[in-house]
Image (cartoon, rainbow, N blue to C red):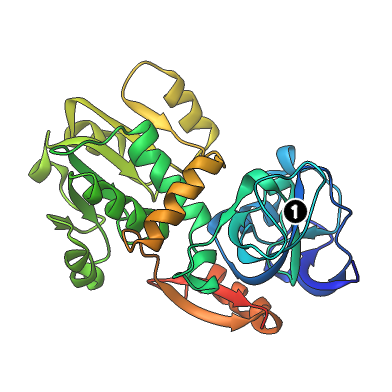
């Protein structure tokens, strides 16, 4: 394939290392597909990868592409690919080792790609993979939430938090959550009750929850113990060495690192196609303008309330 434009970097570092440059996609392995990207969305994990926090996993080969989540059209398939065909409209995520969704084209493993529902736009579809899989695995696979249970989502209006709320409600659970005071109306419209601020007094909700999902990674230990029922448990999606050590000890606390399971991604895509999961879009920019938009998002957390998506056409 001829060279395409891609946001990439030649060393680990802050947003200043990102460049929009020409790049020639690698040849396909038997289990890989080439996707012509129409839209790519940003996640906090993307700049953690770029910072080098995950370099024990991602390695030190450069240049490295930026971004994991995308939606587009399959342009070529490897010799062992059977589930996808050239021309399929798809959504998916690249692995941290092979990131590079903020580009005109990306090569990814077939397992990380599923068909896009026809009633979802490429922009909407690109916002789903990371937040959807993380929320689904936290609420359904690990949290085992059920109808009649009570769930508390700390950071209920972030990308993962909002998806988790919608998934838990669809299962018949009741959902409480924390958010900024200025966002209370949005949380109420989503079906969350009660709604508290990030600095809430846990005594007011003591012993009420079967499952607590900490999307912000900032819920104090004492608060989680107070909020959780005796048979309940807590899932934290913000791993650190200290949290892994805590997770290894007996008790209800667990650190979740989402796994890119094809079946889970397909479930999320189908749910979004049916309107059961909606990820709001905060800002859409052309790929040519994405560098400044990514820097603004990382440094100033804007736009708030929705995903940043770069489009290629």
Left of 227 or right of it: where is 261? right
Q: Compared to 129, does 142 lie above or below?
A: above
Left of 135 or right of it: where is 202? left
Residue 89: image quadrant is bottom right
Q: Position of residue 55 (x, y in %)?
A: 73, 43
Residue 43: image quadrant is bottom right
Residue 217 seen from this side: no
- Residue drawn at x 24%, y 73% as measured from the top left: 182
Q: Nearer the viewer, residue 8 or 296?
A: 8
**Count of marks overlaid on the render:** 1
Residue at the far left: name it: 204
Q: Compared to 189, does 69 lie above or below?
A: above
Q: Where is residue 29 in the image (x, y as percent from the top left)?
A: 84, 45
User: For the C terminus, which image quadrant?
Assistant: bottom right
Q: Position of residue 218 (x, y in %)?
A: 37, 47
- Badge 1: few (under 14), some or many (20 or more) residues near its Cα, within 10 Å? many
Q: Position of residue 234 (x, y in %)?
A: 31, 33
Residue 231 seen from this side: yes
Query: Circle 1 sits in a helix, a strand or a loop, which is it?
Result: strand
- Residue drawn at x 19%, y 49% as measured from the top left: 175
Query: Label 1 belongs to which residue?
Result: 33
Q: Which of 178 and 307 is in front in this view?
A: 307
- Residue drawn at x 12%, y 54% as measured from the top left: 194
């Amino acid at each position: 394939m001829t060279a395409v434009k891609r946001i990439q970097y030649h060393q680990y570092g802050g947003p200043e290392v990102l460049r929009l440059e020409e790049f020639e996609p690698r040849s396909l392995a038997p289990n890989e597909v080439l996707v012509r990207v129409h839209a790519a969305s940003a996640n906090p994990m993307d700049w953690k990868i770029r910072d080098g926090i995950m370099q024990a996993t991602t390695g030190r080969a450069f240049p490295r592409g930026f971004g994991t989540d995308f939606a587009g059209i399959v342009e070529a398939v490897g010799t062992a690919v059977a589930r996808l065909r050239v021309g399929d409209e798809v959504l998916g995520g690249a692995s941290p080792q092979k990131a590079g969704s903020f580009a005109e084209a990306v090569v990814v493993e077939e397992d990380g790609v599923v068909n896009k529902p026809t009633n979802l736009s490429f922009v909407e579809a690109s916002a789903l993979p990371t937040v959807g899989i993380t929320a689904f695995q936290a609420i359904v696979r690990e949290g085992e939430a059920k109808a009649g249970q009570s769930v508390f989502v700390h950071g209920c209006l972030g990308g993962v938090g909002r998806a988790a709320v919608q998934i838990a409600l669809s299962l018949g659970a009741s959902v409480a959550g924390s958010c900024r005071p200025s966002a209370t109306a949005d949380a109420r419209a989503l079906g969350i009750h009660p709604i508290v601020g990030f600095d809430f007094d846990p005594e007011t909700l003591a012993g009420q929850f079967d499952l607590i999902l900490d999307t912000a990674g900032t819920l104090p230990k004492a608060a989680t113990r107070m909020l959780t029922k005796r048979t309940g448990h807590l899932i934290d999606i913000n791993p650190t060495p200290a949290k892994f050590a805590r997770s290894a000890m007996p008790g209800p606390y667990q650190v979740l690192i989402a796994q890119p399971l094809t079946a889970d991604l397909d479930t999320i895509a189908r749910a979004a196609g049916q309107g059961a999961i909606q990820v709001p879009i905060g800002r859409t920019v052309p790929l040519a303008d994405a560098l400044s938009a990514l820097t603004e998002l990382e440094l100033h957390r804007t736009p708030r309330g929705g995903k940043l998506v770069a489009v290629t056409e």
